């Protein structure tokens, strides 16, 4: 059966650079604005403002500790203090040798960050990416490796499963989470898709692109079947189920011209935040 196509989404904000790491927080959608080195937040009426400084370049993301302090990835993992200053939250260099990219904080306060471990924009040879765990006591250790460009991650609401997108392999990979936060029982959750930033709904499906850099956002069930598809006019870098009841699907779209033309893509200012309503609400983390 062909997947259902949903109506064209509404535009909340546009004319931006490349947008990533959408997070529903304190009644607004927060997201990384790559190319402008800032964190933005937009409400459901399209009112958008800068809410925190970001990091230089591409590849950084945000999340929050259980006490509400903001975390920002990049060359190091930073934490914003109540006075607005940033400090290093944990020394991740022994595990993530090229800094960290995506981040998810689960319901127990465990932080998972990942690293692609090669110079993507510089044309480096792909190597096995990693996931690092930072526990609430500050301990850092590697919990997964040999990942083909690890990207967006979600943790199920019972803190039992972590799913990560492997963009260069075109698959979603799942792990069981054990009591100490370690990841075991690695398995393919869905294949032949194009995951970047991802979000999970209450029926256990994941929203992501249906193919690498596809102009769509699709609802995918375990095993890979696409049940819903939203056609877009440019790639969807990430998505998030948020809103008051977590039934608003936010999509971060922008032009992509390849790793050798990032400056050109940023200059075109095609980044947009799109939104539409769905039936099944979001769950889990982020």
Image: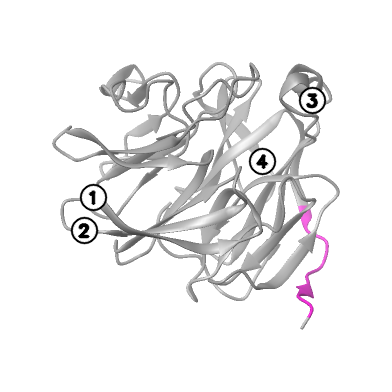
Instruction: Give the residue pinned by disc 4.
Output: 47
Instruction: Give the residue pinned by disc 3.
Output: 265
89, 81: nearer the viewer: 89
**Residue 182: image tag:** 1
Q: CA distance from mark 3 to mark 2?
A: 41 Å
Point out the tag, 3 or 4, that comes first from the N-terminus. Answer: 4
Whether 5 is among the magenta residues is yes
Instruction: Give the residue pinned by disc 2.
Output: 178
Residue at left 45%, top 35%?
129
Where is residue 229? Give x, y as percent: 74, 66
Point out the tag, 4 or 2, that comes first from the N-terminus. Answer: 4
Where is residue 12? Give x, y as percent: 73, 47
* Rendered view: 176 above or below 141: below
**Crowdedness of circle 4 by 10 Å Cα count: few (<14), some, many (20+)?**
few
Scheme of image coloration: one colour
Point out the tag, 1 or 3, that comes first from the N-terminus. Answer: 1
| Left or right: where 19 falls relative to 173 | right
* Rendered view: 256 above or below 164: above
Q: Magenta region: which residues? A: 2-10
């Amino acid at each position: 059966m062909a997947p259902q196509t949903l109506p064209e989404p509404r535009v909340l904000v546009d004319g931006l650079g490349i947008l990533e790491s959408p997070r529903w927080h304190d009644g607004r959608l927060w997201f990384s604005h790559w190319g402008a080195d800032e964190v933005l937040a937009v409400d459901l009426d399209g009112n958008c403002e800068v809410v925190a400084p970001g990091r230089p370049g591409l590849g950084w993301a945000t999340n929050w500790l259980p006490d509400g302090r903001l975390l920002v990835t990049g060359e190091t993992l930073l934490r914003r203090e109540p006075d607005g200053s940033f400090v290093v939250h944990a020394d991740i260099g022994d595990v993530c040798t090229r800094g960290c990219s995506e981040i998810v904080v689960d319901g127990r306060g465990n932080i998972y960050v990942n690293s692609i471990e090669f110079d993507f924009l510089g044309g480096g040879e792909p190597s096995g990416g990693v996931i690092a765990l930072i526990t609430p006591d500050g301990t850092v250790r590697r919990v997964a490796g040999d990942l083909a460009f690890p990207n967006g991650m979600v943790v199920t609401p019972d803190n039992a499963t972590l799913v990560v997108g492997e963009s260069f392999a075109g698959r979603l990979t799942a792990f069981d989470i054990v009591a100490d936060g370690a990841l075991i029982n690695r398995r393919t959750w869905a294949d032949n898709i194009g995951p970047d930033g991802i979000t999970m709904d209450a029926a256990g499906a994941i929203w992501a692109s249906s193919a690498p850099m596809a102009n769509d956002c699709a609802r995918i069930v375990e095993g890979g079947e696409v049940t819903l598809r939203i056609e877009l006019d440019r790639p969807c870098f990430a998505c998030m189920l948020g809103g008051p009841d977590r039934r608003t699907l936010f999509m971060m779209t922008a032009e992509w011209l390849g790793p050798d033309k990032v400056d050109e893509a940023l200059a075109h200012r095609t980044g947009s935040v799109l939104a539409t309503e769905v039936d099944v609400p979001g769950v889990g983390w982020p």
